[in-house]
Image: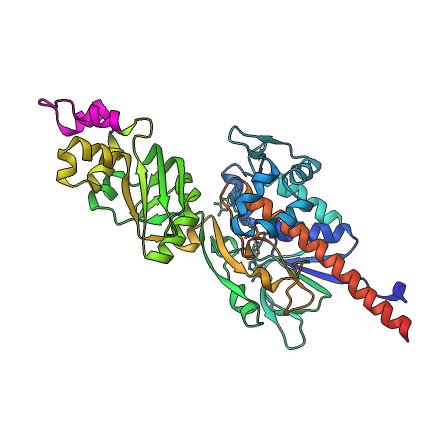
Amino acid sequence: MAATEPPPIIAVIGGGPAGLMAAEVLSLAGLQVNVFDAMPSVARKFLLAGRGGLNLTHAEAPGIFVTRYGGRRAEVGRWLDEFGPQQLRDWAHALGIETFVGSSGRVFPHEMKAAPLLRAWLHRLRAAGVIFHARHRWRGWDDEGALRFATPSGEKKVGTDATVLALGGGSWARLGSDGAWVPLLAARSVAVRSLRPANCGFNVAWSEHLRRSFAGTPVKNVSARLMAPDGLVTSREGEFLVTENGVEGNLIYALSAPLRDAIETTGSATLNVDLAPGRELPRLTEDLARPRGRDSLGNHLRRHAGITGVKAALLHEYATPADLATPERLAAILKSLPLRLVSPRPLDEAISSAGGIDFAALDENLMLRALPGTFCAGEMLDWEAPTGGYLLTACFASGHAAGRGVLRWLGQVHLVINDAGSDE
Ligand SMILES: Cc1cc2nc3c(=O)[nH]c(=O)nc-3n(C[C@H](O)[C@H](O)[C@H](O)COP(=O)(O)OP(=O)(O)OC[C@H]3O[C@@H](n4cnc5c(N)ncnc54)[C@H](O)[C@@H]3O)c2cc1C
């Protein structure tokens, strides 16, 4: 009887790293896989990530790696057990893409680009029989449970045996992931936490002078410290960029989750920036207390504290005349400049999204409990991580897990059919 059954038809919707990895797992198992994507071509955000060098993953020890997923480390850790950073590097190697570990432990392809990897991968997927359907925007289901797609030639309906949704988060909508799936799933009783910016910049109420003179200027060699409303202190060293509207860059992205959460709780967040991290407060105070003579304050700061340019401008932005007049207060504010962040930049500008499908809505196969046969993967799930290769690693790993989940579920379905048959 099984021999006459047509093979199951699988739809993967969303051709980013998560969807393509699910398609690969399923096609390798011999299933007929159709990948649908709203855009004229797949993996546009992945290609954009390649412009920044394509930080694929990180070489730190697995026990540390998994902590980068914070409160979701248990769930993400299960995906990584099957397909973690080393498996990802081996997989890239099998596609002819060698990787290397940078000085910070970040892992990149030798060519520092996504295009060669994507090209080789799509070639292999097509050779394995995966069929791609571009310009197919998923619109939900019809009353019979068929998938509805908006296409250039009108609405198309597709019936499947299993579907993997890998529609991404809500940033950089012009590359395809626009979060329009949220109401479609919410209408089907799937719990979705609202999408919020992660690894994002923040708005600061700069003075006109600072904005005009310093927007686009990096603030190098600083450290920053945040005390969250619950008293937890996080600090980082590095650099950030002053922008028209506020601040962005690696140092800010690294602190963006607690900064965003603090703003959500208290309405704003104060980041204490140390503009002179190499100098101890008592020594700095002593140096600044030296007689100024006829020196301007700018010269005095440059000579005795190494503070010039944008750092001096930031000081003037926050210091009162009394701070500037007293060496103790001047040193104190240079060591702990209270940068007040008023709101995150819009989700569309963020590197990634926090929020997404609640893990409670998913079973251990990443199948939606409310919609048997529909699986989910990638950034559309409710986890977040800093930059450093953790985002792509979890997207690939969850795509792998969802593909395996479909295989297990189809196995179970067939088992049930066969059991039912043998009972008759
Ligand atoms: C500028 C930038 C740089 C980055 N650099 C890195 C990096 O170096 N390292 C790293 O780890 N991460 C990086 N990231 C993050 C990483 O690219 C994403 O986390 C990852 O691409 C998410 O993968 P995904 O498969 O879940 O979703 P996506 O890559 O967003 O893919 C989702 C796909 O679904 C399609 N889609 C959406 N809605 C529909 C619909 N209704 N119908 C049909 N198709 C639909 C989209 O067109 C898209 O192709 C970067 C992100 C940005 C913005």
Q: Quadrant of residue 409?
A: bottom right
Q: Residue at x 53, y 59 (%)?
A: 356
- Horizontally, residue 177 falls left or right of residue 132, namely left
Name the colouring of the figure: rainbow
Q: Position of residue 106 (x, y in %)?
A: 54, 34
Q: Quadrant of the N terminus?
A: bottom right
Q: Quadrant of the C terminus?
A: bottom right
Please name whichever residue, 188 or 292, is drawn nearer the observer in this view of the structure.
292
Q: Residue at x 40, y 54 (%)?
A: 261
- Up/down of 37 relative to 394, above or below: below
Res. 306 visible in picture? no
Res. 206 visible in picture? yes
Q: Position of residue 354 (x, y in %)?
A: 49, 54
Please name whichever residue, 413 or 72, is drawn nearer the observer in this view of the structure.
72
Residue range of the region highlighted in magenta in the rendering: 282-307
- Horizontally, residue 414 falls left or right of residue 404, namely right
Q: Main secondary structure of the magenta part?
A: helix
Decide whether residue 304 is among the magenta residues: yes
Q: Position of residue 250 (x, y in %)?
A: 42, 39
Please name whichever residue, 50 or 234, is drawn nearer the observer in this view of the structure.
234
Q: Quadrant of residue 304?
A: top left
- Horizontally, residue 297 falls left or right of residue 423, namely left
Q: Residue at x 64, y 45 (%)?
A: 80
Please name whichever residue, 252 or 23, is drawn nearer the observer in this view of the structure.
252
Decide whether residue 94 is among the magenta residues: no
